[in-house]
Image (spheres, rainbow, N blue to C red):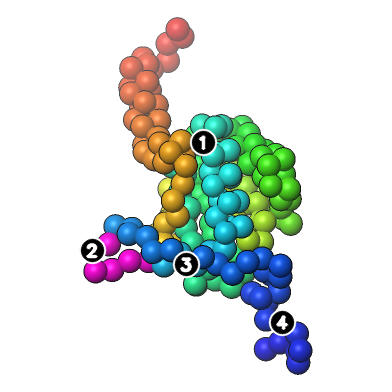
């Protein structure tokens, strides 16, 4: 409940922002069903820039969801992962730098820096999750948001799909080829 005369939280968050452009996307649905993207143009712009920055730093499995219909606190989530803590940090730093430089956006909150296993950047309109590959599998955020429309991403970001699995296979092959207890 908001005090008399005060705007609702969602409206206050988007003061000065044009209303969302509604766009119908076909997302793994039968032809009779579709999802309507209700995220604002600004949110979509932030997502595209962040996704490209993540892809440029070799993130794995970059994906974005429009969560504006189910959450009032943000419009979209961007998920990305990396096989080690150092790369998680590098991806986050690149996203933060690119959003600041290109769009003048600064996160209102940054969490998870200490261990660099799961770093969250909260830009209010969007929330970016960059996780270590192990955390990505364990927490499976995609499962939570699978009913939300998937947002279109730049080609480089789409090309990251399946990279985590490919990396894990490569690591397993290398481990199997290494003799136990021998120095190379």
- Counting residues from the N terminus, which is met first, the one under dot 3 or under dot 2? 3
Vertical relation: 99 (above or below) 87 = below
- Element on which disc 3 rests: loop
Q: Is residue 38 left or right of residue 5?
A: left
- Counting residues from the N terminus, which is met first, the one under dot 3 or under dot 4? 4
Quadrant in which the C terminus appears: top left
Residue neighbourhood size for the residue with mark 2, other residues' Cα within 10 Å, grouped as few (<14), some (14–19), many (≥20): few
The image position of residue 27, as x and y in percent, is 33, 58
Residue 32 covered by magenta stretch: yes
The image position of residue 90, as x and y in percent, is 63, 34
The image position of residue 120, as x and y in percent, is 63, 51
**Residue farthest bottom in this picture:** 4
- Element on which disc 4 rests: loop
The image position of residue 143, as x and y in percent, is 40, 59
* Residue at (47, 58) in percent of width and height: 65
Distance between the alpha carbons at the discs numbered 3 and 4: 23 Å
- Element on which disc 2 rests: loop
The residue that disc 3 covers is 22
Q: Is residue 71 visible?
A: yes
- Counting residues from the N terminus, which is met first, the one under dot 4 or under dot 2? 4
Q: Which residues are magenta?
A: 29-35
């Amino acid at each position: 409940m908001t005090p008399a005369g005060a705007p609702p939280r969602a409206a206050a968050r988007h003061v000065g922002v044009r209303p969302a452009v509604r766009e119908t996307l076909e997302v793994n649905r039968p032809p009779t069903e579709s999802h309507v993207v209700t995220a604002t143009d600004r949110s979509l712009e932030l997502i595209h820039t962040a996704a490209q920055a993540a892809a440029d730093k070799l993130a794995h499995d970059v994906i974005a969801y429009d969560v504006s219909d189910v959450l009032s606190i943000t419009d979209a989530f961007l998920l990305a992962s990396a096989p080690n803590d150092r790369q998680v940090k590098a991806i986050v730093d690149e996203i933060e730098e690119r959003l600041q430089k290109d769009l003048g956006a600064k996160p209102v909150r940054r969490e998870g820096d200490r261990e660099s296993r799961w770093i969250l950047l909260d830009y209010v309109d969007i929330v970016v999750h960059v996780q270590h590959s192990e955390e990505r599998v364990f927490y499976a955020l995609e499962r939570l948001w699978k009913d939300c429309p998937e947002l279109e991403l730049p080609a480089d970001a789409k090309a990251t799909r399946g990279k985590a699995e490919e990396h894990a296979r490569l690591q397993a092959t290398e481990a199997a080829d290494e003799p136990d207890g021998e120095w190379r």
